[in-house]
Amino acid sequence: MARRLVCVFPGQGSQFVGMGQDLYERDADVRALYHEANEALGYDLQRLCFEGPAETLRFTQHTQPAILVHSVAVWTVLRKGTCQPVLLAGHSLGEYAALVAAGSLAFADAVRLVHSRGRFMQDAVPPGQGSMAAMLGVERQTVEVLCAEFAGAGVLQPANYNAPGQIVIAGETARVRAMVQAVKERKLGRTVLLNVSAPFHCAMLQPAAEQLATVLEKVVVHPCAIPVIANVTAQPHSSPHNITTLLMAQVCAPVQWEDSMRYAVAQGCESFLEVGPGTVLAGMMKRIAPQVDVLALDDLLRA
């Protein structure tokens, strides 16, 4: 009997110069995707992905469509084989790629959406005013209590519930740094200040959520042909209206990744495949559910 598979799509930070070039060179459908993306964006995303420079690729408004296009390209190749997932999910930005794979969003619409999303998120907070930090080995309840303690009248909140012992916080820079210092002094775990361009998934990005809402209103959203787990609820999207609402909410809400993967396991998923650049999500899954098989993407593509 075939093993039940969940396919997941990575988020921002997994990009690298040269990603997707091998698929582009050997698959006509992948070449068509990059050409369609170039037309949708009005600039040469293909060249930026393949040749860089890395500094330009790291700009949020370029990174987001670059990762989405690469992820959909990998998905396009996978679907020519025997890949038959019962569930899809994507980490933050990756949720858009999952919705394309599910037939909910048209590819060109998704490319334009994430380009706008990246620009809105980048512009929402002036440089230096917001930060993010990873809390490693700190219990979920402890992170939440500390966020409440150091937020005061400002913004400090969990941004990514990635895996057991791996939670990312976001908020005003002074508050993030104060909490990082407290974790060190109280010997609660390790902390890493993240090199990011904005404090993603926190209330400081409310202006970006409002701008994204006006763009989402103009996009046709279809029901998912394959269920897609929403970041905000860790449950499958229930309707096109629900998809639009949760994509808007996702900008300021924490990514419930651990709970999303636990939902997949509870639905009987025994195998996990990361579709897109990098292996960050595979590493998280090994911490969340060690009993699940994490499949090697390269092996599947050669099969």
Image (cartoon, grey):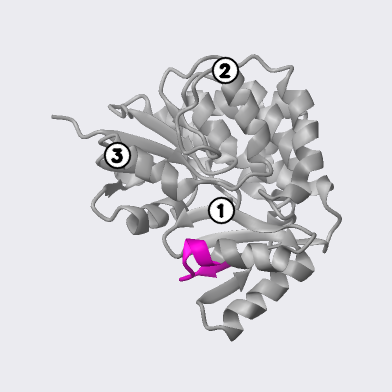
Q: Earlier in the sequence, mark 3 or mark 2?
A: 2
Residue underneath mark 3: 266
**Which residue is the extreme one toward the right?**
126
Can you see residue 43? Answer: no
Question: Magenta segment: does it hold 139?
Answer: yes
Q: Earlier in the sequence, mark 2 or mark 1?
A: 1
Q: Say which quadrant the N terminus sits in.
A: top left
Can you see residue 245? Answer: yes
The magenta region covers 134-142
- Left or right of 202 in this view: 135: left
Q: Quadrant of residue 111?
A: top right
Q: On screen, 264 above or below 255?
A: above
Which residue lies at the image location 50% right of the left edge and 76% below the top edge?
189
Residue type pointed to by label 1? Asn
Q: Earlier in the sequence, mark 3 or mark 1?
A: 1
* Residue neighbourhood size for the residue with mark 2, other residues' Cα within 10 Å, grouped as few (<14), some (14–19), many (≥20): some
Which residue lies at the image location 60% right of the left edge and 40% below the top edge?
93
Task: Give the image location of residue 182, x and y in percent.
Answer: 63, 79
Q: On screen, 284 above or below 178?
A: above
Query: In the image shown, does 178 or 290 lie closer to the viewer?
Result: 178
Question: Magenta segment: does it hold 269?
Answer: no
Can you tell which mark lies on residue 160?
Answer: 1
- Left or right of 123 in this view: 193: left
Q: Say which quadrant the C terminus sits in.
A: top left
* Residue neighbourhood size for the residue with mark 3, other residues' Cα within 10 Å, grouped as few (<14), some (14–19), many (≥20): few
- Left or right of 121 in this view: 287: left
Mark 1 residue element: strand
* Residue neighbourhood size for the residue with mark 1, other residues' Cα within 10 Å, grouped as few (<14), some (14–19), many (≥20): many
Can you tell which mark lies on residue 240?
Answer: 2
Residue type pointed to by label 2? Pro
